[in-house]
Image: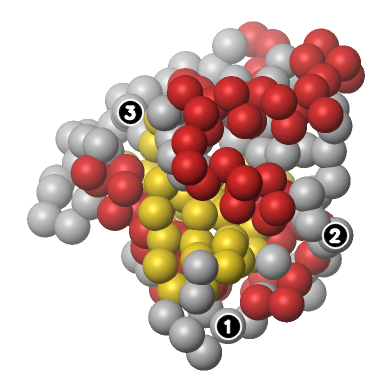
Amino acid sequence: MDEIAVRPAAADDWCSVEKLLDARGSVNGCWCMFFRQTPQERRTEWGDGNRRALAALVRSGARPGLVAYRSDTPVGWVSVAPREEYSRLDRSPLSKRVDERPVWSLVCIYVAREHRGTGVSRELVRAALEFAVQQGADTVEAYPVDDTMGQVPADAAYHGLVTLLRSEGFDEVARRSPKRPVMRWHRPGGRPVPARRRTATPAEEK
């Protein structure tokens, strides 16, 4: 297999991103906007509205994700950004805040069907961590599916897999559902400041 190169999605990469995320086997209609949307936006923008929204982000220079290439062919995508960019995380009991520590969140890993099982996911994770550190991140958080408990359907694997993330240095820090832990990776050489536990609101405690 040819070497994999991963780079942040810039305006010139939009055609590659579009080709990749519009392909059969991707989460059709999502365009990696689900975690960024309000419930109203999800109802009204799913599909072409999401495509336009992601195109606007990419073309603006916001770098909402990274693209993996193999011989100039786009083969994978990963979305990583400061947690605050993904409003959905705070609305889900699975991914609610563990504490008040600033984190970046890795929310989506997608590999083109014909390139799965060839190391693309691992390269995407490594590139996402490197990118986050370059932007000043000390901690990266993910919300994977625990594949040690059984086979993970392809349409759920975009969350990431526990075995992959664990092998790349992530550790479990919370688990609100049997198969969906919260995992964190810390910058090598860095000593994360002690986390201040977040007090749950009355609504969250119900």
Structure colour scheme: secondary structure
Q: Label 1 amino acid?
A: Thr
Label number found at residue 24: 2
Give the image quarter of residue 43: top right
Q: Label 2 amino acid?
A: Arg
Q: CA distance from mark 1 to mark 2?
A: 19 Å
The percent position of residue 10, horizontal first and vertical second, equals: 44, 40
Q: Residue 70 or 122: which is nearer the viewer?
A: 70
The percent position of residue 4, horizontal first and vertical second, equals: 44, 74
Q: Which residue is mark 1?
A: 118
Quarter of the C terminus within the rendering: top right
* Nearer to us: label 1 or label 2: 2
Q: Earlier in the sequence, mark 1 or mark 3?
A: 3
* Nearer to us: label 1 or label 3: 1
Residue 105, visible in the rendered structure: no
How many residues crowd around disc 1 within 10 Å: few (fewer than 14), some, or many (20 or more)?
few
